[in-house]
Image: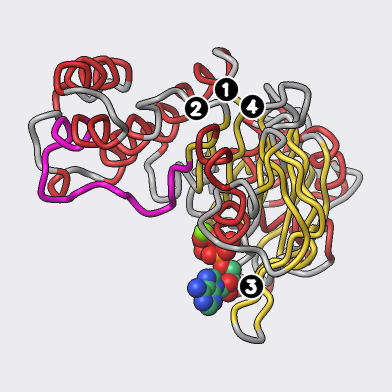
Amino acid sequence: MTDSHAPAIEAIGLTKRFGDFTAVESLDLRVQTGTVVSLLGPNGAGKTTMVRMLATLLRPDSGRARVAGHDVVSEPDKVRRVISLTGQFAALDKNLTAAENLRLMARLRGHGRIAARTIAGALMERFDIEAIGDRVVKNLSGGERRRVDLAASLIDMPQLLVLDEPTTGLDPRSRQVVWSTVRDLVAEGVTLLLTTQYLEEADALADRVVLIDHGREIAAGTPAQLKARVGEQRVDTVVTDAAQLERLDQALSASFATSVARDQRTVSVPAPNEAADLTRVAQAIRESGIAVDEVALRRPTLDDAFLALTGRPVNADLDGEADSAHEPITHEVAR
Ligand SMILES: Nc1ncnc2c1ncn2[C@@H]1O[C@H](COP(=O)(O)OP(=O)(O)OP(=O)(O)O)[C@@H](O)[C@H]1O
Ligand SMILES: [Mg+2]
């Protein structure tokens, strides 16, 4: 029996080691039924390891976890009945078509041939993949494949859906499609645990965010609480000649209370008023006569969260990846 009063997920001190490397270290996690919780962290933070333990695919070394009241170690069958994990890497058969994959998965879940066909058809309609249903999966784009993946995880509507980085590598449009699908599911009452590398995604979808790194919790709270600690959007100005950085900093300090030189060519100012602040920056630059390459409004990224909450950047070699999803809103400046 599923205990309807139990939280969807309750993990205490969950730990996983691979040899002498600790991937998840004494992590607590609580997900209330009907809510969306995001596990946010950079590459290697331990997100996949954590969700695989919760989905009974990996055995914890210590700590304990219950899913809908069932222990992941002693009652794995009961846990599997309520949880559906959409893994980070597609679990589809690349040589079958999208429709064949969905029908096959429905059959594997015990549905008869006709029922499987009906279920697959309904899911394809819902995820807007009817047009690509007859194409073999290996020829689909990343975004198309991701939608087929999501459809496959909903063959039997789960109580608890776990999505492991559902939008990594997707273009902004495909990301929006996945987001709106996720919102629909949540509106239907599905409890969701979502891992992501994007602060913006956690902000857009989650009721609560748990930021992790090196298998440990760094911060947790509502997106608003986290954003209050991380800071809001800002305007970044990239100077053409690094020697002019200080002059630019002074020019911007004159019209903004604070400005921060972020690297050798970039000065940041807080931009709570978005476009209005962007315009003010552009004006200050024009008046100063300093040549700049770019002026852009940026929303806080995972990098910014790390810097604000830990005082250090995310692993330097991975910077680009965490940032790539954030298309800046760029404003051309007359020189
Ligand atoms: N089976 C394994 N054997 C050894 N090390 C592992 C194994 N699985 C994961 N790790 C290591 O544990 C750490 C956490 O990995 P995990 O896959 O949980 O990270 P992640 O947060 O999901 O990262 P990403 O965003 O890149 O998917 C990594 O350093 C990884 O190399
Ligand atoms: Mg992962």
Do the CB atoms of the residues marked 2 and 3 lie less than 8 Å apart?
A: no
Q: Nearer the viewer, residue 283 or 130?
A: 130
Q: Earlier in the sequence, mark 1 or mark 4?
A: 4
Q: Give the labeled residue for mark 3.
A: 315
Q: Earlier in the sequence, mark 2 or mark 3?
A: 2
Do the CB atoms of the residues marked 1 and 2 lie less than 8 Å apart?
A: yes
Q: Amino acid at mark 1?
A: Val
Give the residue at x 32% y 50%: 90
Which of the 4 quarters of the picture holds residue 257?
A: top right
Which of the 4 quarters of the picture holds residue 223?
A: top right
Q: Earlier in the sequence, mark 3 or mark 1?
A: 1
Q: Which residues are magenta?
A: 85-102
Q: Give the labeled residue for mark 4.
A: 1
Foreground: disc 3 or disc 1: 1
Q: Amino acid at mark 2?
A: Pro
**How many angstroms separate mark 4 from mark 2 (CA)?**
15 Å
